[in-house]
Image: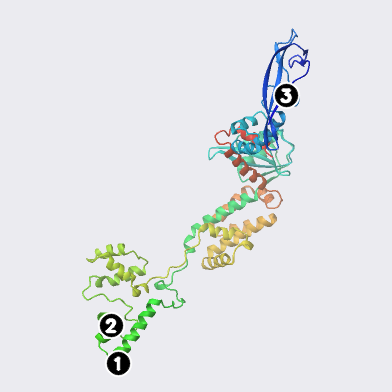
Amino acid sequence: MRIKARCTGLEAECPGCGSPSRRVHSRYVRMLADTAVSGRPVGIELHVRRFFCDEVACGRGTFAEQVDGLTVRYGRRTPTAQRLLERVAPALGGRAGGRLTTHIAVPTSGSTLLRTIHPLDVPAPPKVEVLGVDEFSLRRGRVFGTILVDMESHRPVDVLPDHTADTFAAWLREHPEVRMVCRDRGGAFAEAAERALPGVPQVADRRHLLDNLATAVEKAVRKHRACLNPPLPEHGVPESAPDPEESPARQRIRARWTEIRTLHERGLTITAISEQTGLDRKTVRRYAHAATADEPITVRPRRGSALAPHMPYLAARWAEGCNNARTLRDEIAARGYTGGRKTVRRFLNSPAEKELSPIKPPPPPPVREVVRWIVGRPERQSEAARRQLKELCEHCPHFGEINRLARSFATLLRKRHGHRLPEWLARTDVSEIKELRTFAQGLRKDLDAVTAGLTLPWSSGAVEGHVNRTKMLKRQTYGRASFGLLRRRILLAD
């Protein structure tokens, strides 16, 4: 939609000295973009004039007239459209914001949106009583920043260019109204808070405490990883394993043996039985001479077979779990075997040798899965997970002790029973689990903040949410995410 307009005022005021002027210097057309109407882009073709400034003391020779609420100096958009972009840019950034402006019929490039953020005024930090602090990565593993959050309103109040104690302490000195600091287990923030506001209560984040506990439990579980494997019964077959159901092939062999033995006992010759059953005479003879139905199942090597001397060795290696025909052929070749790999494979695939196959136990649970069983909420675990954890604790006393100590601390954390922390620390001191003793020593170094974290309702969950949002904002401005631009986006985005 194109709108043509013209300025009709008789005079205009000079923006430099404020004196009115009626002398027209020239005329020109300004093209202004406005917000959409019924989903259609709107362009305003505005005819404006340039006036002479007759004030001798004014340094301006000429000036262009402006329309209140419609034009600004050097502006190519109306104030309404500009305010719309100033709301979109901090929230969505460049590319995502550019896609949105196309849908709302105010098409703007991503680079223009990012340039829109720079001149915006950042609001002054409000007064904060309960402050949350955490670090985030500007360049992974190299450069870090710090985000400060009002724990009562859950809104960011400021962003610092690094995560050093000096920078955070300087900020706290400028804001003496802070009466509590919620932080992670890092020493820099604790040192800064104690240096700038001596005696201010500090609260250790419960999520970080739980992460530290999970790390200690994982180290302890890996140390006793061998206990995760269930004990192997003798000969690879469980003592109480039920008899496997007979396969259809074995059933056919037994039926064939019964039929051939019945005909043979009636006095029929091998040739007659072969003609009647349609089987080869050698097969009939083998079934007729077998004393039991299990005898035909066993594959007997031909007389003079090169594999016969090595069959006990193959059976032993099969029982150990080696079932690769090529590997076994190479091994018995070193022992004097001159046959081929297919002969070895046929022997391994025979029904008799399949009975020697060891029953593989189920794989041990992954270490992190065991850690999740121990540290996670018991009411959210499946019945199978609870059963496996119980079996592990009964099988290995170390796992039982790890489970008892870790679960009791997790219960203290979730129910906020900080008054019971000294009792838990005393139990850990006499424990044989070195990793949990080390974890307890770390808690003692920050005992007041840990006790407050296990007692007070404050936690840094809101800060962690803003850290994750900061990572998203940083990725949206990838390649142009300077600290100044990122800070404005964090503080201006709703």
Quadrant of the rendering where the C terminus is positioned? top right
> Which residue in the protein does label 1 denote?
266
What sort of colour scheme is used for the picture? rainbow
| Circle 3 residues within 10 Å: few <14, some 14–19, many ≥20 | few
| Circle 2 residues within 10 Å: few <14, some 14–19, many ≥20 | many
Give yes or no for contact between labels 2 and 3 (Cβ–Cβ under 8 Å): no
Q: Position of residue 230 (x, y in %)?
A: 47, 67
> Which residue in the protein does label 3 denote?
5
- The kind of residue tagged 3 is Ala
Q: Position of residue 469 (x, y in %)?
A: 62, 43
Q: How far is the residue under mark 1 from the one under mark 2?
A: 14 Å
- The kind of residue tagged 2 is Val
Local secondary structure at mark 3: strand
Answer left or right for 27 relative to 281. Answer: right
> Which residue in the protein does label 2 denote?
284
Q: In this picture, is 333 found above or below 213?
A: below
Q: Residue furthest left?
A: 304
The residue located at (28%, 72%) in the rendering is 311
Question: Which is more foreground, mark 2 or mark 3?
Answer: 3
Quadrant of the rendering where the N terminus is positioned? top right
- The kind of residue tagged 1 is Arg
The residue located at (62%, 40%) in the rendering is 470
| Residue 8 lies in quadrant | top right
Q: Position of residue 276 (x, y in %)?
A: 29, 85
Q: Position of residue 107 (x, y in %)?
A: 63, 34
- Whichever of labels 1 and 2 marks the residue nearer the N terminus, that label is 1
Question: Which is more foreground, mark 1 or mark 3?
Answer: 3
